[in-house]
Image (spheres, rainbow, N blue to C red):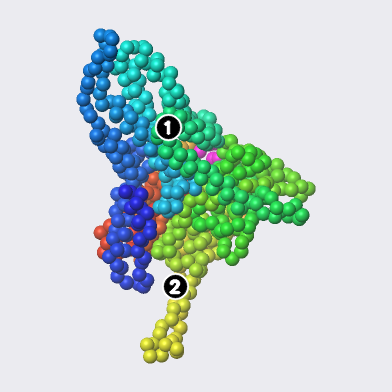
Amino acid sequence: MLLLATVFSRLLRPSKKNGDGARQGFCYRLVRLVAAIVRRYLVPECQKVFKHTTRLQILVLFVLCAYLTAFSLAGITYKTWVTPVKGTNLHNIRSGIGGFADRLGAFAFALTPLTIALCARDSVLSLLTGIPYQSFNFLHRWTGRIILVQSFIHAIIWTIVEGRLYQPQPTVYIEWIKQKYMIWGIVAQSFITFLFVFSLRPVIRWTGYEFFRKSHLIVAGLYIGACWGHWEQLSCWMIASSAIMGFDLVARTVRTCLIHFRYKDGSSGFGFRSIPAKMEVLKDPTGTIIRMTFSYSHQPWELGQHFYLTFPALSIWQSHPFTPASNPTTISPVQSHVYIIRACNGETKKLAELAEAAASRYPYGDDTTPVILQGPYGGSILNDEVSNILAISGGTGITYTLPIIMAAVADSSPISNIELVWTIRHLENLAWISPELAYLKSQLDQTLTRTTNSHDKDKIGKAPIVSVETKKRFRIRIFVTRPDARMLSRQQQPHQQYGEKSKDYGFNDKLSPVPSASSTYSAPLNRGLEDLIQEHPNFSITYLDNTRPEVSSLVDAFLDETVEKGRTQVIGSGPPELGSQIRTAVAAKNRPGDVWRGDDKRDVECVWDDRMG
């Protein structure tokens, strides 16, 4: 029912009437009312039970569990029969628990296709609902755990029945456990237990993400085969599971081939061609950052989507999701990609070493690194009905919000109120996106001119053209949480916008102590960075002493002091804690009653980058 409701709401979504002050229709206001209610009460996270999980996700899981519980218990005969065993003085004990165990086993089989569909990148559910595949990861994990519980209860009950309630023992149990279907059942139980244990976050950190991803795929396929061998009468569910898994794998391969199979340069003929990418290594107190750029001819992606990148020089079996920090274009088939990658441990650390080795070859050799592109994945986050955008990013999360802001400041965009908030540890982090930041600073004083036609009913052919000039409000705010002493000493009071109010940001609790290497870092700023931090009325840098800006204050100031009309979209990316704060702040600003009365200012949408689910 929830799936059907989501599909119909997407297909029958009413459109907004154009024109200021135009009264919206009943259906449109009803849809917006429901959306505001959902955001107000179901978008905040349920931190007490599940970490970084919204109430809406918990509600869907609760409904699923209630459905399974009800139909697992309904229709069972709750009686006990004692029957004699022929030729002995023993008795068999029969009851309804056998039927209950079979019901649980059947539900475990039936949940398998859904569980696989919930984790597929090219998900049928995403095609039907428009919800990005990564949003289903929470339900995928928990439907898998439900299958684990069901299968264990199923196995335990039948072990009790065959090993205790049926007589004589141990003859009955030995004959039962030796049967082919029981052997396959034990194998399937071992596989589902492996999938659960090796999907726990501590185990993933211990074994590595790539081991988890590959072993999960292989063992899931083996689990489907073992279930088929265990109970062939329910093989229809395993056929569906295999079809969904196969479709996803084939779709990934086709996506990659469509991008990379083409005529090679020169006379090499037709074949697979990787993309040569240039990588720049940026080192600052935060750590090592890789800025990777390349251009390639393929279909443009939607803002908010991401790609999986494979680096053949490291391994062709590993791919990682990255969001482009650049904007697609429809003018040319050649798309420019920019990626900001933090070098941590594992594959990204090796990538940084590879980038440094490639840079050392220039100018005597090729300084590029081959890349294989797969995607795009995810959904578009642009909304044509939105008039205000607040983008809040932390660290490398700027790659998600930056393209949205660059699209919003364009003359063709209907968005008139734009603000970018970026929290970084050190001022040197600005170098990650220095070209893009320089462009955005050049747009701070832009003016948008729109042309409208005013017609006289009697003289339509002589209608005059009236030009209306409106100025976009665009502001950039950067917070540096761990500046060195030199920056703190030159700290100035930030420009007070919003009517010179002093409470346009607050402060959270203190951060963890700064490592000594970072606190003593005081290398001179290069000329490019000095140009980036030049003062401007709509550009501010605030140096904080080991604190973070309070997200609720940022959201309140933007909505209460700058939004004059229209709906608002708050977009965020960064640490999970930032997402929790944004969801809570946005939920508090939604007012369902005001939205029903036509006040779009109280219709606030929250978009969070949940690539990793």
Instruction: Tell me the CA gap for discs 1 and 2.
Output: 69 Å
What label sits on residue 232 in the rendered view?
A: 1
Rendered location of residue 535, percent (x, y) = 52, 60
Name the residue: 23% across, 29% down: 77
Residue 115, magenta (yes or no): no
Name the residue: 70% across, 44% down: 358
Q: Which residues are magenta?
A: 514-519
Which residue is disc 2 drawn over?
470
Rendered location of residue 547, percent (x, y) = 44, 44
Residue 518, magenta (yes or no): yes
Q: Looking at this view, is 408 or 36 the one in front?
A: 36
Rendered location of residue 297, percent (x, y) = 63, 58
Per the image, label 1 sits on a secondary structure element best described as: helix
Q: Is residue 454 visible?
A: yes
- Neighbours of disc 1 within 10 Å: few (<14), some (14-19), many (20+): few
Decide: is 207 above or below 432. Answer: above
Q: Amino acid at mark 2?
A: Thr
Q: Amino acid at mark 1?
A: Glu
Q: Is residue 416 left or right of residue 301?
A: left
Per the image, label 2 sits on a secondary structure element best described as: strand
Question: Extreme front residue here?
Answer: 87
Q: Looking at this view, is 275 or 13 the one in front?
A: 13
Decide: is 134 above or below 100. Answer: below
What label sits on residue 220 in the rendered view?
A: none
